[in-house]
Image (cartoon, rainbow, N blue to C red):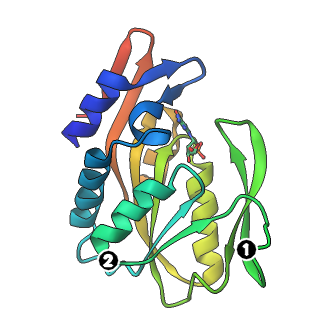
Amino acid sequence: MKRMEEMILAKGKVLPGGVLKVGSFLNQQIDTDLLREIGDEVARLYAGAGVTKVLTVEASGISMATAVGMALRVPVVFAKKHKTSNVDGEVYQARVHSFTHNIDYDMLVSRDYLLAEDRVLIVDDFLAVGAALTGMRELVEQAGAECVGAAIAIEKSFQGSSDKMRAEGFRIESMAVIESMDENGIRFRE
Ligand code: 5GP
């Protein structure tokens, strides 16, 4: 998506360790025109896939997932990273290593919100080493539901997981795919 690439070039900041800071338009302050465009584009790409639910993980995936859910007119479910009193009863649970924070955490979804008959589209802001996406795929599998694919705002293909998953037949649609980035610049996949 051209606009996403333009925003990354204009406002993104490359940090050491392969991290891209996008707080000014995606992560902390959210550009709502861009968000609407992302929602429409993902809905266009997955039209006909029979999506019944969008799944993401808190917190940074929620805005994009909501935009996608609104465009597809399906409910949005987000996995929680902590077991709070709002997560009652039986849960699906997966252990994940966070690339940005270098910690392990559990992602949890109440069994009430992912059903065996669901066709789930996973949405996230970034795809880096793929741990978050793999964790969410595990949750869908535990529910006995079908995962139709993933929609990602920014994929960092140089971190290795995304093309491996595609080669295994898993569908990933990313609004921007970064092939390389350093202090000299950012290169997108054509
Ligand atoms: P993964 O599990 O694929 O390594 O990382 C996915 C999660 O880590 C995303 O949900 C996102 O929150 C965070 N993340 C990974 N790479 C970046 C990055 O370059 N910038 C930002 N802001 N977050 C990232």
Answer with the quarter of the image where residue 18 lies.
top right
Mark 2, secondary structure of its residue: loop
Whether residue 145 sits left or right of residue 37 in the image: it is right
Q: Residues within 10 Å of mark 1 (few under 14, many from 20)?
A: few
Q: Quadrant of ligand 1?
A: top right
The image shows residue 148 at horizontal and vertical percentages of 40, 72
What amino acid does circle 1 point to? Asn
Image side of residue 72 versus residue 180, left or right: left
Q: Earlier in the sequence, mark 2 or mark 1?
A: 2
- Image coordinates for residue 174, horizontal then vertical, percent: 35, 48
Query: Which residue is the site of mark 2?
Result: 73
Is residue 170 something that shows in the picture? Answer: no
Give the label, 2 or 1, closer to the camera: 1
Along the horizontal axis of the image, is 91 left or right of 37? right
Q: In the displayed structure, would residue 130 be above or below residue 81?
A: above
Q: Nearer the viewer, residue 130 or 88?
A: 88
Determine which quarter of the picture holds residue 154. Answer: top left
The residue identified by callout 1 is 86
Q: Measure the alpha-carbon separation of dots 2 and 1.
A: 25 Å
Residue 71's x, y, as percent? 28, 68
